[in-house]
Amino acid sequence: MRSDDDIAIDLLRQVVPEHDEEEEPLWDGTGPVPMIQRGIGYSVPDLTKVPPELRLAALAPFDRRRRFDAVHSPHLPIAEVMALAEQLDTLPPPAREIAQAEIAKGPSIPTPEARRGRQVNVRFSHGDHADLVAAAEIAGTTTTTLARMLVNNGVRRILQEQGAAYARFRATRGGSRAP
């Protein structure tokens, strides 16, 4: 007497056609893995075009989500889906996960002081921006660098010229900042 699984597999084989060798040969393990679209911009390995003995090898380079989606294809017999789903855990981690783990183990690289500073955004009129672009070309630098240099120079000049008066002003207000 046949088991329920055997009957289900036979029924699925009747519903799901076998691969036709004349259409396109099965993937032989070389070249790109055949893919199938599963949504806009999302594709997964097409395991119906991969021989059963190469299916795990075809899945190995892909991330876990694509592996899962490829295995749970409506075009594969349920017995194959179940067998492949059990074997997914035997695959090595995806390359991306390995690379991220290696990066995480490495020494941390300190952020340069300039990148940890504060950011000031300045809005220019079209004419003022055109003048800044021209001045940056003359100075041989970028507009951002020239703007930073001009702001820093202006701040230092104000502090040199007005710093003592400002310090006295703050002292009379109890050390609070001016508005």
Image (cartoon, rainbow, N blue to C red):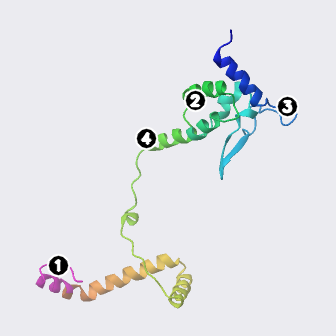
Could you tell whether 122 is left or right of 155 in the image? right
Q: Residues within 10 Å of mark 4 (few under 14, many from 20)?
A: few
Percent position of residue 46, x then y? 71, 37
Compared to 1, does 40 lie above or below? below
Tell me the residue that label 3 is attached to: 21
Tell me the residue that label 4 is attached to: 105
Q: Earlier in the sequence, mark 4 or mark 2?
A: 2
The amino acid type of the residue labelled 1 equals Ser
**Where are the magenta residues, as a range?**
166-179
Q: Residue furthest right?
A: 22
Q: Which mark is residue 17?
A: none
Depth check, front residue: 162 or 57: 57
Percent position of residue 41, x then y? 65, 52
The amino acid type of the residue labelled 2 equals Leu
Q: Which mark is residue 88?
A: 2
Could you tell whether 106 is left or right of 4 in the image? left
The amino acid type of the residue labelled 3 equals Glu
Query: Which numbered mark, 4 or 3, is in the foreground of this view?
Result: 3
Query: Which numbered mark, 3 or 1, is in the foreground of this view?
Result: 3
Which quadrant of the structure image shows residue 160? bottom left
Tell me the residue that label 1 is attached to: 176
Compared to 127, does 22 lie above or below? above
Q: Residues within 10 Å of mark 2 (few under 14, many from 20)?
A: some
Q: Residue furthest top?
A: 1
Q: Earlier in the sequence, mark 1 or mark 2?
A: 2
